[in-house]
Image (tube, rainbow, N blue to C red):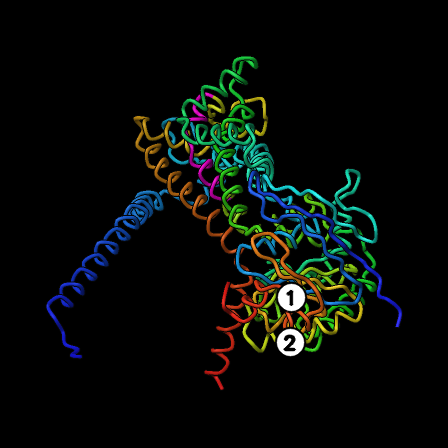
């Protein structure tokens, strides 16, 4: 089997809120067609790190980054890079399902394309169906595409948000605790969906749920207080951690 | 463990009831003035309304009859000028305050200025428009009245827009940005349309407030006794007409003043109610279709 290509990598990435440094020099490589989990106790900077990968972190007043994030070999923090174009290539799913209020289910899915200037109706139709099918939501919503996106249940809303992200076809998808607001059944369907997405996308997921990381992720990284303690294949991290801290955390003695 | 009704429990229950009573009293106190005003102007004013009142102009003193067509249309005209100036600027300024440069010096000054503007007595607004537009044009004119009303409308629309947009959670904006949509499109295509109802309500509130203002019009649009559509000439308005008629010694004019007051209240309430009906049209449609279903099932 040929070696999978590295699609995204961080080199010495540091994230700041004003004077406070939340993430301290983290270097990780992400392969294409893989699921990568980031775990760690609350306040360890894992969400901030994730939000730095698509330059959303800097939208918070006073927040900035140092170090490199390389997307296919190009540092997205170089001066001439337009963050808007970066975000079209690195999609994001948030903790709370957040479909756009006032938009229909259909418009929620294609809004990204529409606002990028796609006007061809049949293409939008096609993209919407394709994305909703991939997000395993099509059968549930195909008869009510004109209903508001907010009329769906929490789990459906989150799959709608995933469909919305897939529609613009980013090679990398970030997920910030995507199931923490959902019940176990909705969580299971999202996890199943992640396994599907893995066939095409590189998925990076922040999670509080260690079982989730163990179930779905190929690789896992463990953060404490903004530092990378350990990273590697999930199997190794969860069965045979090299660091004492990792072992304490995954066995519940700390965190 | 024993569960019994203690004195303490009864005392707590009493306190609960007592405060509930106070709050209900406060709610009634708020409702009373509006009900009394509508009732009183209805009793006094409805009697003097007839077709003439809406279609005719004032008659010379001494002749009975005549109407306020010029003042009714004048009020609508003046409010339209004011809204045309203030609503676009107000909404834009509100968007600026809520979405851009939240902590910049300009937005802090702007925010403070809006608070001040809301508090400026409306007679002062009238004087300002007088100096700005009446003095150089050497005549009272409708434009000055419209501008004066726009200064009444502006801070209300700005503040309403800002507050409504601040209610939109940040993760909605981030979701838009994360799709690779430029910031201005996220704001104008997602955030603002999502808050349309609230902004529309704020605009309507400001407009109905302006429709009832007298002081800013006294020495700007001034008023007249004939029909005029000219923006550079004095123009009648309901509040000023009511004022002039009410202080006049003629009984028929005083009677018509009540009629005008009633019409003004109906216009202001009408703006409020229709705007509510427009933004809740889906709920209205649902309501009527439910009603229809119920009636049909009863028949069957």
Residue B240, image x, y percentages: 41, 29
Q: Which mark is residue A242?
A: 1
The quadrant holding residue B252 is top left
Q: Are marks 2 and 1 on the same chain?
A: yes
Q: Residue at x 61, y 52 (%)?
A: A48
Residue B108, image x, y percentages: 51, 30
Q: Chain of mark 1?
A: A
Q: In the rendered structure, which disc, 2 or 1, sits on the residue that comes first in sequence?
A: 2
Instruction: Name the one closer to the observer, A127 or A174.
Output: A174
Q: Is residue B175 above or below residue B300?
A: above
Majority secondary structure in the magenta region: helix
Q: Is residue A212 above or below residue B44?
A: below
Tell which residue pokes out farthest to the bottom in this image: B300
Instruction: Name the one closer to the observer, B172 or A128.
Output: B172
Label 1: few (<14), some or many (≥20) within 10 Å? some
Q: Chain of mark 2?
A: A
Label 2: few (<14), some or many (≥20) within 10 Å? some
Q: Residue at x 37, y 34 (%)?
A: B64
B16 relative position to A10: left or right: left
Disc 2/disc 1 C-alpha distance (Å): 32 Å
To which residue does mark 2 refer? A189
Q: Which residues are magenta?
A: B204-219
Residue B241, image x, y percentages: 41, 30
Instruction: Name the one closer to the observer, B295 or A35.
Output: A35
């Amino acid at each position: 089997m040929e070696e999978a290509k590295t699609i995204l990598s961080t080199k010495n990435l540091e994230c700041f809120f004003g004077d406070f440094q939340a993430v301290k020099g983290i270097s990780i490589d992400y392969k294409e067609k893989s699921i990568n989990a980031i775990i760690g106790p609350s306040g360890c900077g894992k969400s901030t790190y994730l939000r730095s990968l698509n330059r959303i972190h800097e939208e918070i007043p006073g927040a900035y980054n140092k170090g490199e994030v390389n997307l296919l070999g190009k540092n997205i923090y170089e001066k001439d890079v337009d963050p808007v174009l970066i975000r079209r290539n690195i999609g994001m799913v948030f903790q709370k399902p957040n479909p756009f209020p006032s938009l229909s289910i259909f418009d929620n899915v294609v809004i990204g394309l529409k606002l990028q200037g796609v006007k061809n109706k049949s293409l939008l139709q096609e993209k919407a169906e394709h994305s909703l099918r991939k997000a395993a939501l099509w059968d549930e919503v195909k008869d009510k595409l004109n209903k508001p996106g907010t009329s769906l249940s929490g789990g459906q809303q989150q799959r709608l948000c995933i469909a919305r992200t897939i529609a613009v076809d980013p090679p990398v998808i970030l997920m910030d605790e995507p199931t923490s607001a959902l019940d176990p059944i909705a969580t299971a369907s999202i996890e199943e969906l992640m396994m599907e997405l893995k066939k095409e996308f590189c998925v990076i997921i922040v999670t509080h749920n260690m079982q989730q990381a163990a179930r779905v992720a190929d690789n896992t990284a463990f953060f404490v207080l903004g530092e990378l303690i350990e990273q590697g294949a999930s199997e190794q991290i969860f069965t045979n951690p090299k660091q004492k801290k990792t072992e304490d955390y995954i066995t519940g003695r700390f965190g | 463990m024993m569960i019994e009704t203690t004195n303490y429990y009864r005392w707590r229950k009493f306190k609960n009831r007592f405060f509930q009573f106070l709050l209900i009293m406060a709610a009634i106190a708020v409702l009373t003035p509006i009900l009394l005003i509508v009732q009183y102007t209805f009793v006094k004013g409805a009697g003097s309304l007839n077709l003439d009142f809406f279609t005719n102009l004032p008659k010379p003193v001494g002749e009975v009859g005549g109407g306020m067509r010029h003042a009714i249309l004048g009020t609508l005209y003046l409010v339209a000028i004011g809204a045309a100036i203030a609503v676009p600027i107000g909404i834009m300024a509100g968007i600026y305050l809520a979405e851009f440069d939240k902590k910049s010096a300009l937005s802090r000054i702007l925010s403070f200025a809006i608070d001040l503007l809301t508090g400026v007595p409306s007679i002062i607004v009238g004087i300002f428009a007088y100096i700005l537009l009446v003095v150089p044009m050497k005549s009272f004119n409708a434009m000055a009245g419209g501008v004066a009303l726009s200064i009444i409308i502006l801070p209300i629309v700005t503040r309403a827009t800002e507050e409504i947009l601040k209610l939109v959670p940040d993760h909605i904006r981030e979701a838009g940005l994360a799709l690779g949509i430029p910031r201005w499109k996220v704001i104008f295509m997602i955030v603002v349309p999502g808050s349309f109802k609230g902004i529309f309500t704020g605009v309507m509130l400001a407009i109905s407030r302006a429709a009832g203002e007298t002081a800013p019009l006294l020495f700007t649009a001034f008023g007249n006794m004939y029909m005029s559509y000219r923006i550079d000439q004095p123009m009648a308005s309901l509040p000023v007409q009511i004022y002039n008629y009410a202080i006049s010694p003629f009984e028929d004019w005083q009677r018509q003043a009540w009629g005008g007051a009633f019409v003004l209240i109906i216009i202001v309430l009408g703006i409020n109610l229709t705007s509510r009906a427009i933004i809740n049209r889906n709920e209205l449609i649902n309501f009527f279709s439910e009603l229809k279903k119920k009636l049909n099932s009863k028949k069957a």
